[in-house]
Image (tube, rainbow, N blue to C red):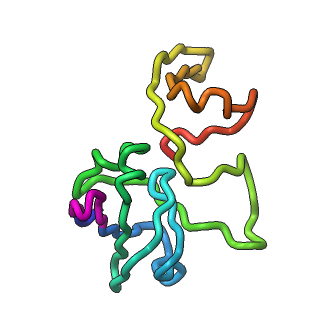
Amino acid sequence: ILEVENKDGGRRLVVRPDGLDLGRIAIGASVAHSGVCLTVAGKTVESYSVYASPETLARTTLGDWQQGDTINLEASLRLGDELGGHLVFGHVDGLGRIAAIDPSGESFRLAFDMPEDLRPLVAVKGSIAVDG
């Protein structure tokens, strides 16, 4: 993250997309920023800018991001792109918190607390993105 500016109750971010082809990212494109889809509002030779609304700040950790932070970036899929893993969207419905981390062999089992109003919407064995 090159710049962070609080603006109109939200935040404007300027991002240098190391590892992404900036030529593929057009103004108006949707890019996932650590799992949060944001629309590209402006672009330079080395960076682009996005705006996170107050709603986005309330439902994500984006309000904690600072200049110099490194975040995960993923360009939108295009029709015909290979799909692997689980298909999830970058539209965030709420903010969960890690409740427990238990070792399980060579992995870990994580438990999360989540907003009560979202619990009925979670499918058994459904996919939930954790920080992207």
Is 76 on the left or on the right of 36, as rendered? right
Residue 124 on the magenta segment:
no
Observer-nearest of 121 and 110: 121
- Residue at the spot 44% in from the left edge and 27% down from the top edge: 97
Q: Residue 14 lies in what quarter of the image?
A: bottom left
Residue span colored magenta: 4-13
Q: Position of residue 101 (x, y in %)?
A: 49, 18
Q: Name the residue: 53% across, 14% down.
A: 102
Q: Residue at x 55, y 67 (%)?
A: 75
Residue 8: x and y in percent read 25, 63
Q: From the viewer's perspective, tell me whether residue 116 is left or right of residue 55.
A: right
Q: Residue at x 40, y 69 (%)?
A: 17
Total numbered circles: 0
Residue 107 image point, x, y percent: 59, 23
Relative vertical location of residue 32 with respect to residue 106 in this rendering, above or below: below
Q: Please name the predominant secondary structure of the magenta segment in the image.
A: strand
Instruction: Single out the residue that lies furthest toward the right.
Output: 80
Task: Judge whether residue 12 is colored magenta.
Answer: yes
* Residue 26 vs residue 12, the one in the foreground: 12
The N terminus sits in image quarter: bottom left
Whole-percent x, y for residue 69 in the image = 28, 53
- Decide: is 100 above or below 34: above
Closest to the observer, 99 or 115: 115
Judge left or right: residue 29 versus residue 104: left
Identify which residue, 10 or 13, lies in the foreground: 10
